[in-house]
Image (cartoon, rainbow, N blue to C red):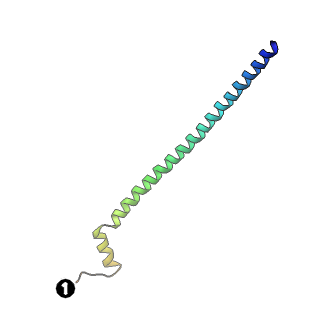
């Protein structure tokens, strides 16, 4: 009967050690995943800031006044004289 008690106690001790190691491993994995989550959230925030900056830049470049200015200065375009305008009818 003593041998059965010793075997049972040894088995329970092994089970406690295995579950303790499982808890330690799970907490470690949880910390690793939390660090990864935080890193990805920071990356997302940086990308959102960059996206907002790019949207603002696109809106600035697409202003009709700016397009007109670029066409006149870089391309040498001018508004046509009234005599050069022809109306096309279908």
Residue shown at 24% from the left, 81% from the top:
79
Residue 64: percent from left, percent from top: 28, 69
Image quadrant containing the N terminus? top right
Q: Secondary structure at mark 1?
A: loop
- Please identify the residue farthest to the top as the structure is shown: 1
Other-residue count near label 1 (Cα within 10 Å), few / some / many at <14 / 14–19 / ≥20: few
As displayed, is residue 63 above or below residue 51?
Answer: below
Q: How many marks?
A: 1
Residue 34: percent from left, percent from top: 55, 40
- Decide which of 67, 25 is in the foreground and name it: 25
Residue shown at 20% from the left, 87% from the top:
84
Residue shown at 34% from the left, 80% from the top:
75
Task: State the image quarter where residue 20 is shown.
Answer: top right
Would you say 9 lies left or right of 67 here? right
Task: State the image quarter where residue 26 is shown.
Answer: top right
- Decide which of 79, 36 is in the foreground and name it: 36
Would you say 10 lies left or right of 24 here? right
Would you say 57 lies left or right of 26 here? left
- Please identify the residue farthest to the bottom as the structure is shown: 83
Residue shown at 74% from the left, 25% from the top:
14
Image quadrant containing the C terminus? bottom left
As displayed, is residue 21 above or below residue 46?
Answer: above
Residue 48: percent from left, percent from top: 43, 52
Would you say 8 lies left or right of 41 here? right
- Decide which of 50, 9 is in the foreground and name it: 9
As displayed, is residue 30 above or below residue 51?
Answer: above
Task: State the image quarter where residue 11 is shown.
Answer: top right
Residue at the disc numbered 1:
86
């Amino acid at each position: 009967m003593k041998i059965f008690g010793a075997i049972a106690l040894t088995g329970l001790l092994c089970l406690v050690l295995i579950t303790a190691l499982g808890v330690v491993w799970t907490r470690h994995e949880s910390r690793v995943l939390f660090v990864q989550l935080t890193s990805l959230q920071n990356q997302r925030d940086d990308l959102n800031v960059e996206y907002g900056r790019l949207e603002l830049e696109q809106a600035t470049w697409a202003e009709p006044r700016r397009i007109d200015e670029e066409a006149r200065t870089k391309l040498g375009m001018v508004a046509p004289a009234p005599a050069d305008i022809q109306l096309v009818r279908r």
